[in-house]
Image: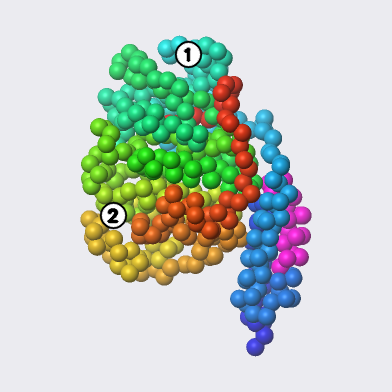
Amino acid sequence: MDWRIELGFTDRLRAIQSLTAAHQQTASSSAFAEAQAKARQCETEAYEKATSKEAYDQLCQQAIDNAERAFKVTSTDCSTPERDDIPILKENPDSSTERYAEGNGGETIGAYTSCTPCFDGLHSTIYKSHAEDGTVCAVKVTTPHLMTAPHDTAREIRLLHEASSENVVTLVETFNLDGGRMAMVFPFIKYDLAQLLQRDMVTATQIRSILRDLFKALQHIHHMGILHRDIKTSNILMDSPDGPAYLADFGIAWKEDDPGSEPKESKITDVGTTHYRAPELLFGYKAYGPSLDLWAAGCVVGEAIAVGHRPLFDSGPLGSDLSLVHSIFSTLGTPDESVWPDVEILPDWGKVEFFTYPPRSWQEILPAVSSKGRDLVSRLVRYQGSERLSAEELKQCQPAMRFFSGCNTHSPPPSSGEMGSPAGIAN
């Protein structure tokens, strides 16, 4: 029987939609009609050339990869201008923040005047302000004695100083305030990855460049023995969509020899944010290591490259652990000892019986994306922590090297001037 008879209209329409999304995703300025026309042409060629359904799928995937490759060549020397119509401040539901209107006046915090609140988080308030030399800053005010573990301002300050590097947000200074409060001053960086993805302000090349900087930051802090424990899109900051990107918010970071950190084998499991949390946390494993950050980073990559930037997993409207477990299991398949050997040492494994879901292919999980990006996610988002690529291994990993090839190179970050999104330093 001719394979084309079994290929229905819905299958071909889905392929065209995937190809259209791929052409639009590679260049944010690409008009829908133009992208759809290219998609129809690619799908028709695949339909006519293929000798089987498998060959048809492969040709469609090649067309998606070719679209990305062609865009990479034409965009090497191009940058995206800043858009003045995008407001700097935004609501950030992940950090339970409220948005404030920026106005004249404001309060004085230490040597910083005209401080206007822009985010009010669970454990801090962020102000936009100006230093004496006119530099725009973000002043983060916390009340350390009211915090509960794993939040620790003193540890955050120590680890930020220790982790200082080109891809970690700069802590300018700290000082004490009345009432036992502490102020931390950062550059006011204009964007975070969450808002850029939400507003579709980044191209595929810019996304790869931002993600490359994230992994450079992780390589650096993991080499120093620091676990971030809250990797997510809103904690990745940049001055423009072209980068460079900075890892922010070390409020719950951990290092074994830091006096404010828990014992190595008894770490707190209430870390991470909603759908970025690794499965070992959900089953009470306290001896986790750097692979915790790599799972979350893999989720960030998946979200960044996905059509529509939909998160890989869903923890439900209330951020429920059970909802997240269901989402992970129904996506990757319900694990057993053969897939996840560490289940034998998970304190809460076996307390609840789960439906046995079959694993879905990564092509089904992440359709219409670069095969190189999909391969990278598949090497990070794995049940067994020891099987996840480490940040250091990414340097030699062929899928990662292919994915990051052609990224923009950044000039050194500016030393003064306005930089501004405080979302990623709130906690």
User: The C terminus is located in which quarter?
Assistant: top left
Q: Amino acid at mark 2?
A: Phe
Q: At numbered mark 2, what does the secondary structure look like: helix, strand or loop?
A: loop
Tag 2: Cα neighbours inside 10 Å, few (<14), some, or many (≥20)? Answer: some
Q: Position of residue 3 (x, y in %)?
A: 65, 82
User: In percent of the image, x 49 and y 67: which residue is there?
Assistant: 361
Q: Amino acid at mark 1?
A: Tyr
Tag 1: Cα neighbours inside 10 Å, few (<14), some, or many (≥20)? Answer: many
Q: Position of residue 176 (x, y in %)?
A: 34, 16
Q: At numbered mark 1, what does the secondary structure look like: helix, strand or loop?
A: strand
Quadrant of the image occupied by residue 358: bottom left
- The label shown at residue 112 is 1
User: In percent of the image, x 30 and y 15: which residue is there?
Assistant: 179
Q: Which residues are magenta?
A: 27-43
Q: Along the horizontal axis of the image, is 13 left or right of 147?
A: right
In the rendered image, residue 41 lying in the magenta stretch gets the answer yes
In the rendered image, residue 307 lying in the magenta stretch gets the answer no
User: The N terminus is located in which quarter?
Assistant: bottom right
Residue furthest bottom as drawn: 1
Residue located beneath label 2 in the image: 283
User: In percent of the image, x 53 and y 54: which residue is there?
Assistant: 400
Vertical placement of residue 11 versus 118, above or below: below
Q: Is residue 354 visible?
A: no
Q: Position of residue 246 (x, y in %)?
A: 50, 36
Q: CA distance from mark 1 to mark 2?
A: 45 Å
Magenta residues: mostly which secondary structure?
A: helix
Q: Along the horizontal axis of the image, is 213 left or right of 356?
A: right
Q: Position of residue 403 (x, y in %)?
A: 57, 54
